[in-house]
Image: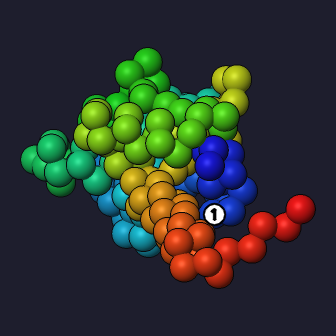
Amino acid sequence: MLIKDLLNHKGNSVFTIPEHASTLDALKTLNEKHVGSLIVINPNGEVAGILSERDILAHFQQSVRGVPVTDIMTPRDKLIISHGDDSIDYAMSIMTEKRIRHLPVFEDDRLVGLVSIGDVMKAVSKDLEFESKLLNQYITGSYTIVP
């Protein structure tokens, strides 16, 4: 399965916050939307970075003072991203290796979605369940090959 297939299934809506917003605004939005990260947008509507729950916790003292999100976000030039044609396996391996939970998805220079480690694990689990069922049918002889 490819990242674009996952986005087609789960949807490609992304929650954003302006880069001039405070970390307190970000906390409120994260809580209201029940999400773990927000894409930070500059005044031109372009991606400036990503802000996650982990960023807020790692900079807790600054966060509770309401500093601008730009003070603690991961800036665009340090973003770890994916593309629609990347495989779910790639996403899972990069998220595990880099210890990140949210992966922005870009096509060319345009943000097209965001996948979480939960989205990826759900997709992998479904694929494994399907494969397991097919193997079980094959072993038990109940699998039929249609010419």
Q: Quadrant of residue 59?
A: top left
Seen in the picture, residue 36 relative to 55 is either above or below; the reply is below
Front in this rendered view, residue 52 or 28: 52
- Give the residue at the far left of this rendering: 61
Q: Quadrant of residue 79?
A: top left
The quadrant in which the C terminus is found is: bottom right
**Extreme-front residue of the structure:** 141
From the viewer's perspective, is residue 19 above or below residue 118? above
Q: Nearer the viewer, residue 100 or 143?
A: 143
Task: Locate residue 3, reporting x and y percent.
Answer: 61, 45
Q: Residue furthest right?
A: 147
Q: What residue is drawn where x is 68% and y is 46%? A: 4
Which residue is disc 1 drawn over?
A: 10
Could you say which quadrant of the image residue 134 lies in? Answer: bottom right
Q: Position of residue 97 (x, y in %)?
A: 28, 34
Specify whether residue 65 is in view: no
Q: Position of residue 87 (x, y in %)?
A: 57, 39
Tell me where residue 104 appears, x and y as whole percent.
Answer: 52, 39
Question: What kind of residue is marked 1?
Answer: Lys
Q: Is residue 32 visible?
A: yes
Label 1: how many Cα within 10 Å (few below 14, some 14–19, many 20+): few
Toward the viewer: 60 or 124? 124
